[in-house]
């Protein structure tokens, strides 16, 4: 509830409270309620608290005072007991302080410390795995119909004694995970046509819940393509002992791998491969490798290697082991010698033209080349010569002796090894010969005991040579299965084209938020969960999908709808003076950060005589179907105590533009209920309001057409980036930003510690990247909805002292840049 009081009358208390370490805004707030302010003053004096608390502890003392003003029976010694627990850092949250106060009220001194600690969750810790298990058990034991019950399930779980003190976000994540496994992805459960309610000023008596399917939905891993995959061990082998040894090594579990070539940044298409490989393994309690497929020494770069791991982790997955194809160069070489000895490979000196001609130039069956039947000994010597640098590139190749009578060109004596005079990023100049993809991929899958080698349908024809080679060498033969790839329309994903866009200045780097590389989507603020939800929602089948960017954005919007806190934001500020409010009056308004998600908490903002609204919410001409501000018209202000009516306005004498509105606060109850509500921010220097946004970057589509062709340069949309300067944000933003970053850091720490603990030591050397906490944290973790404006995230160009522990006000030297993640509704072209 809002109360009104001027700063000045509270001043002595405010400065006392500030000396505890509270910010101006919080001190003001604490002084607001006379009853708890008196208790607080008393606590500070009796326990000489000045200078002994940091900001966090100070706010806990404020909470204690609030609690004590309600619990009259807590004696002096009991108060001291709780204060000491705050000062010692044992009590860390308002929730704990509340429970502590109630406890000492019921159990006066001497307090049983052990019982007190247990009751208040002091020293409580639980691993994310345990949270997950407890949550699964809870959900199993209760009748739950579907996603609509998520909120009540979470609060139910949080009231169980075991999870009473678990981190709320951990409980929420675990519950969502179990729900996804049980009922399928969240958006599948949602009704259609909810969009129109987006702008509703106040959630009209909560929407009727959509009818929920009561049969649990199978997940993408249990049906269709992934549901039909073989069980580990069911893939045929050339000799039975290979299966036995394989199953012994894997204990019959699913082992997969994600094998990117480290020659570029991953794009959204790769998120499907990541989801399929990591997700399928995780679903079956198996393991997934990250394997850098680095057989081509020319293309690899260290920055790509690091970025790939970072993006996988950002998407929520942890590789079991990180390997490189080049880890196996020696084994691969030895098997090549073995292949020659088995008369299944030969060294060929034909030119590329001759090989092409022999292969029928694309028409008809191939002819054997003149080297195909040379003696085994000769090939062994020549292969050794290749290895020792006798040949220049293209002068000699090791070719597999496959089946020239087969209809599949992938069986026509593919190259296994070629000479390349290039340094490799890891093996340096050790090798002059390098294995090809066709030779390497299946063998490394075999070495790593992959149970399911999942790839896209372009590799269907390669499956035959994959199996041929494993059988020719009599090694364990994984089963390759192919699913359809994911294409996004309206953008380019080829490395060459993106490179051209970057080099020619059409975009500002590989992480320019207009691109669909994963680093770009991340920077733009797209939550990793939205990407997973998008991919999983599309399903996995053998058909490739061509998806419009609009559909992707719609998934992001749906994902953010119930996860992003909502703030008041004004893009094009227009000053409003409310002339029936005194100069120095300030009303502190406490408002929920999300009307339907109370767990997101609340924030406090000032309401004063001078506010700003969006220039678009005012018109000189009124009309019947217009409900916002115009001369003589009344409009509601979101969460403000009363509506305002425009009584007059001022114009710029030169341009004639309206520069200020004069309004009247309708605080007498006489005005009618307003038909519309608009966003606003107040001017109030003591609390740092409003916060000025230095740049708001609005991204529109980069290309005009859905299929940017080879001539993609001429297809560029000249208005793909708009930069708005001087937008205004409510003061709730800074505490929110700080909290989001702290939460991200905490989560990242937990995840990274777990990842490092679980990681198998890699066979590779020290420059193999590994999990670090920094990989998961970035400004983009700060996301919110600007009410009626759009979804935003903090850009990496931002500098905010408050994120590094500074006070929660915008400071000299700060530079605030926001990216629009998505608009609130699909752009129709007009507004
Ligand atoms: C794969 O399985 C074989 C037995 O078939 C075992 O000797 C080998 O150590 C396993 N390799 C890995 C990387 O697990």
Image: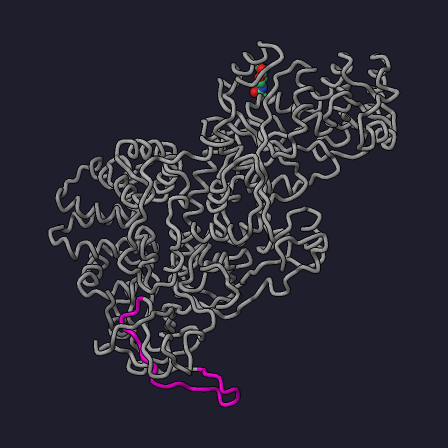
Q: Which colour scheme is used?
A: one colour
Which of the 4 image quadrants contains residue 454? top right
Taking 165 as reference, is 381 left or right? right
Does the magenta portion include 156? no
Q: Is residue 15 among what the camera can see? A: no
For the N terminus, which image quadrant? bottom left
Relative depth, front residue between 237 and 384: 237
Residue furthest bottom in the image: 653
Residue furthest left in the image: 73
Count the marks. 0
Taking 395 as reference, is 772 left or right? left
User: In x, y percent, where is residue 26?
Assistant: 31, 62
Residue furthest front in the image: 364
When the figure is inspected, residue 741 is found, relative to residue 461, above or below; the finding is below
Q: Residue at 56% of width from left, 13% of height from top?
A: 243
User: In x, y percent, where is residue 557?
Assistant: 45, 53
Q: Give the range drawn in magenta.
A: 639-659
């Amino acid at each position: 509830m809002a109360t009104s009081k001027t700063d000045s009358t509270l001043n002595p208390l405010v400065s006392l409270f500030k000396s505890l370490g509270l910010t101006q805004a919080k001190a003001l707030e604490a002084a607001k309620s006379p009853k708890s302010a008196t208790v607080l003053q008393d606590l500070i004096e009796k326990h000489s608290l000045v200078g002994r608390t940091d900001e966090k502890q100070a706010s806990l003392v404020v909470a204690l005072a609030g609690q004590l003003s309600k619990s009259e029976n807590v004696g002096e010694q009991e108060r001291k007991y709780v204060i000491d627990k705050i000062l010692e850092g044992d009590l860390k949250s308002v929730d704990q302080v509340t429970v502590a106060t109630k406890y000492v009220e019921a159990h006066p001194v001497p307090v049983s410390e052990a019982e007190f600690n247990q009751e208040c969750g002091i020293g409580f810790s639980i691993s994310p795995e345990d949270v997950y298990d407890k949550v699964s058990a809870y959900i199993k034991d209760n009748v739950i119909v579907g996603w609509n019950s998520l909120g009540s399930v979470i609060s139910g779980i949080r009231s169980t004694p075991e999870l009473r003190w678990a981190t709320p976000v951990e409980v929420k994540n675990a519950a969502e995970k179990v729900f996804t496994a049980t009922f399928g992805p969240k958006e599948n459960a949602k009704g259609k046509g909810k969009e129109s309610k987006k702008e509703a000023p106040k959630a009209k008596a909560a929407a009727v819940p959509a009818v929920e399917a009561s049969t649990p939905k199978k997940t993408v891993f249990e049906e269709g393509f992934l549901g039909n995959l073989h069980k580990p061990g069911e893939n045929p082998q050339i000799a039975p002992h290979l299966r036995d040894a394989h199953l012994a090594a894997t204990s019959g579990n699913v082992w997969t791998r994600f094998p990117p070539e480290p020659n570029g940044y991953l794009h959204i298409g790769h998120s499907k491969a990541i989801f399929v490989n990591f997700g399928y393994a995780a679903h079956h309690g198996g393991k997934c490798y990250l394997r850098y497929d680095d057989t081509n020494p020319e293309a690899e770069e260290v920055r790509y290697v690091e970025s790939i791991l970072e993006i996988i982790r950002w998407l929520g997955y942890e590789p079991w082991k990180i390997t490189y194809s080049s880890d196996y160069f020696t084994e691969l070489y030895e098997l090549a010698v073995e292949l020659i000895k088995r008369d299944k490979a030969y060294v060929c000196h034909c030119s590329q033209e001759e090989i092409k001609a022999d292969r029928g130039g694309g028409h008809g069956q191939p002819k054997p080349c003149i080297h195909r039947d040379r003696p085994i000994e000769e090939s062994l010597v020549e292969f050794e010569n290749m290895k020792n640098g006798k040949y220049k590139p293209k002068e000699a190749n090791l070719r597999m002796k496959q089946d020239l009578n087969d209809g599949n060109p992938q069986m026509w004596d593919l190259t296994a090894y070629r000479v390349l005079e290039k340094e490799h990023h890891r093996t340096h100049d050790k090798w002059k010969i390098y294995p090809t993809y066709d030779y390497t991929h299946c063998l490394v899958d075999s070495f790593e005991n992959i149970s399911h080698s999942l790839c896209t349908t372009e590799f269907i024809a390669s499956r035959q040579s994959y199996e041929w080679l494993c059988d020719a060498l009599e090694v364990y033969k994984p089963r390759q299965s192919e699913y359809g790839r994911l294409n996004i329309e309206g953008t380019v994903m080829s490395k060459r084209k993106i490179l051209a866009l970057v080099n020619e200045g059409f975009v500002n780097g590989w992480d320019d938020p207009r691109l669909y590389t994963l680093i770009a989507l991340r920077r733009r603020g797209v939550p990793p969960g939205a990407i997973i939800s998008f991919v999983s929602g599309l399903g996995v089948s053998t058909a490739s999908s061509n998806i419009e960017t609009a559909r992707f954005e719609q998934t992001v919007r749906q994902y953010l709808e119930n996860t992003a806190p909502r703030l008041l934001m004004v893009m094009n500020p227009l000053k409003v003076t409310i002339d029936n409010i005194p100069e120095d009056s300030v009303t502190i308004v406490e408002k929920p950060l999300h009307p339907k998600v109370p767990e997101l908490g609340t924030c406090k903002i000032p309401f004063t005589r001078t506010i700003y609204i969006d220039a678009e919410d005012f018109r000189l001409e009124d009309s019947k179907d217009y409900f916002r501000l115009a001369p003589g018209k009344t409009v509601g202000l979101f969460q403000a105590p009363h509506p305002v009516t425009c009584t007059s306005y001022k114009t710029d004498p030169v341009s004639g533009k309206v520069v200020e509105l004069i309004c009247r606060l309708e605080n007498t109850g006489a005005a009618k209920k307003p038909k519309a509500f608009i966003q606003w921010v107040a001017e109030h220097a003591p609390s740092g309001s409003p916060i000025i946004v230095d740049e708001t970057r609005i991204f529109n589509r980069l290309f005009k057409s859905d299929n940017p062709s080879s001539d993609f340069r001429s297809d560029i949309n000249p208005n793909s980036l708009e930069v708005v300067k001087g937008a205004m944000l409510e003061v709730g933003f800074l505490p929110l930003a700080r909290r989001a970053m702290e939460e991200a850091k905490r989560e990242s720490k937990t995840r990274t510690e777990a990842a490092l603990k679980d990681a198998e030591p890699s066979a590779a050397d020290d420059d193999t990247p590994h999990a670090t906490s920094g990989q998961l944290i970035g400004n983009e973790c700060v996301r919110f909805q600007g009410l009626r404006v759009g979804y935003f995230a903090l850009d990496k160009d931002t500098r905010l002292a408050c994120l590094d522990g500074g006070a929660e006000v915008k400071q000299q030297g700060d530079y605030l840049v926001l990216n629009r993640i998505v608009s609130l509704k699909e752009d129709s072209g007009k507004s």
